Image (cartoon, helix red, strand yellow):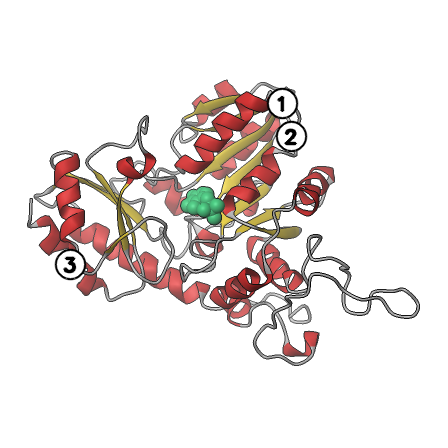
Amino acid sequence: MAVIPNLKPATLLAHGGRRPEDDGGDVSPPIHPSTNYARGEDYGLIKAETSYSRDANPAYPPVENLLARLEGGADAMLLASGMAAVAAVIQALRPGDHIVAQKVMYWGVRAWLTGFCADWGLDLDLIDTADPAALAGAVKPGRTKLVWIETPCNPTWDLADIAAAAGIAHGAGAYLAVDSTVATPVHTRPIEHGADIVMHSATKSLNGHGDAVAGVLVTAKADDFWDRVRANRALGGAVLGPFETWLLHRGLRSLHLRVERASANALAIARHFEGHAKLASVLYPGLEKHPGHDIARKQMQGGFGSMLSFCVKGGAAEAMTVAGRCQLVVRATSLGGTESLIEHRASTEGGNTPVPANLLRLAIGIEDAGDLIADLEQALAGI
Ligand SMILES: *Cc1c(COP(=O)(O)O)cnc(C)c1O
């Protein structure tokens, strides 16, 4: 694929970012289960630049190059999970470094970050990064090494302005990392807005079929910090297995179509249920009333993502009744699959969650929008 410049993302993805000629003629990507790779008589590696599968798998480069190209980055890395990708970045910092991160975001990242920073002597401030003034007040020039944002963020789908956050982070001498799992490279390319590192839970839309746990990092520049992150994968050992790599590569080939369809479905559902008699609010950045709508229009193209939340009139009991009455939408966690899911987020996150008890998180799939609307209508009729 390297020979044709300026191919559009849909084209790059459909071909899995590779040419059959590049590796032996397989039209579909091959799988490489071997853990080690032999040397020839001259002691040079016969197959690839890798000798051992914890450093890299021969199936990584086409996927990593594809992701780097989609995000407009210098390099990309596959990791064992989204959380492993987060950990590889945070563990490249040093004790005493200051991190500013978002208060409202994917709970697993917030929980791990809070515990890890306390245990390992990193100074963490959690703020509302949707408010640039709060971010500007939180960074400590010279001491802040990383600003971490998720946009749109779980489960309110509020937007952080990536360009504004990058300006503030860089002004303080810090990197900006963006968890872009929900936006996907189809809708947002954070590096174009100034981000230094992009992270994805590839478990979600990138793989897209709910059958592989995987993580991705993309960097704007291949610098010393990136080398430290890479060492965390190779020596820390959070590598993606050969079979998961193959599943991710297969899923990526339909990413563009899936994301376009799921986002169109989510917008249709959000518009249909906005102002519904049984709902206190519908949270979706594609709605004009959503507080992040203007930023979303600025930094998302082709759609606003597949995630939305319903806040039902009532509390946890009413929310549970609605979830319980769904017949098509599946009651399960996660997102970015082909089938739509509904989740009572406060029970998933437990004890000290900031998520309201009446909130239901919807991860929209690629079904017929009318079928989804009918199922949700009949579910809401039960309260
Ligand atoms: C799922 C998710 C993660 C964690 O990724 P895993 O692949 O489950 O480790 C991080 N951020 C967001 C936004 C997610 O949805």
Compared with 377, 361 (above or below) is above
SS state under label 3:
helix
Q: Earlier in the sequence, mark 2 or mark 3?
A: 2
Q: Amino acid at mark 2?
A: Leu
Residue 179 visible in the snapshot: yes
Q: Amino acid at mark 3?
A: Asp
On the image, the x and y values in percent for residue 68 come to 61, 55
Q: Are marks 3 and 1 in contact (CB under 8 Å)?
A: no
Q: Residue 89's spot in the image, x, y percent?
A: 60, 38
SS at circle 1: loop
Contact between marks 2 and 1 (CB within 8 A): the answer is yes
- Quarter of the image for the N terminus: give it: bottom right
Q: Earlier in the sequence, mark 3 or mark 1?
A: 1
Circle on res. 97: 1
Q: Secondary structure at mark 2?
A: loop
Q: Which mark is residue 93?
A: 2
Residue 226: mark in rendering: none
